[in-house]
Amino acid sequence: MDLLHELTETRRETLGYFALPEEDLQKTYQPGKWNVRQLLHHLADAESVLYDRVRRVIAEPKQVIWAFDQDGWCQQLDYLTFPLEINKNIYASIREAVIQLAQTHYATASDKTFVHSETGLRTLKDEFEKITWHNAHHLSQIRQALG
């Protein structure tokens, strides 16, 4: 699958899950793991972080970009009670912007580099591909939870 198609398809599937009934939002894919609600909040927050990285790399390549503590975000931003509708809107608008940036920069600026604080040297191409992989990875967990 090409990147733009994958970004579009994962957006479509992800947005559909925001409308699940409460009982489905409480389901987990494994005991002790995040429930569907927490996964959706995480996808919205990660989308915003990854979008910021992509913009930074396009505008100011060769910088160090720090990792974020996803469990800290889940706990401190209270994913269990934060309104899901807010993060649905954030996810949708940011994914639209990611698609726009991918259309403009994926092929022409994919070799721009940055240093990730945990994984080392990366490229813009790597980061765009991480966005699609990350979303698809969590969609598989949601599907498993809903089983």
Image (cartoon, helix red, strand yellow):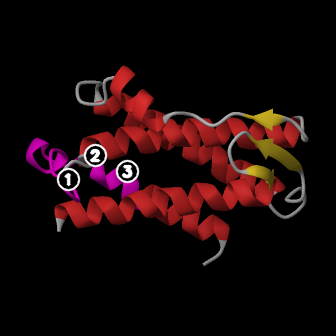
Label 2 vs label 1: CA separation? 6 Å
Q: Is residue 68 above or below residue 130?
A: above
Does residue 91 appear in the picture of this structure? yes
Disc 2, SS: loop
User: Label 3 belongs to which residue?
Assistant: 15
Label located before the other in sequence (1 or 3): 3
Note whether 70 is above or below 24 in the view shown.
Answer: above
Q: Give the range drawn in magenta.
A: 13-31
Question: Looking at the image, which residue is at 27% across and 65% down?
Answer: 143
Which residue does the numbered mark 2 point to in the structure image? Answer: 34
Mark 1 vs mark 3: give the one in front: 1
User: Which one is nearer the viewer's eye here, 26 or 98?
Assistant: 26
Could you tell me which quadrant the N terminus lies in? bottom right
Q: Which of marks 3 and 2 is nearer the N terminus?
A: 3
Q: Residue 28 shows which numbered tag? A: 1
Side of 63 relative to 65 (left or right): right
Q: Position of residue 137 (x, y in %)?
A: 44, 62
The Cα atoms of the two marked residues, 1 and 3, are separated by 18 Å
Any magenta on residue 26? yes
Q: Which mark is residue 59?
A: none
Q: In which quarter of the image is residue 43?
A: top left
Label 3 and label 2: CA atoms lie apart by 18 Å
SS at badge 1: loop
User: Going from the N terminus, do you reach mark 2 or mark 1 first?
Assistant: 1
Res 79 quadrant in image = top left
- Would you say residue 97 sits in the magenta stretch? no
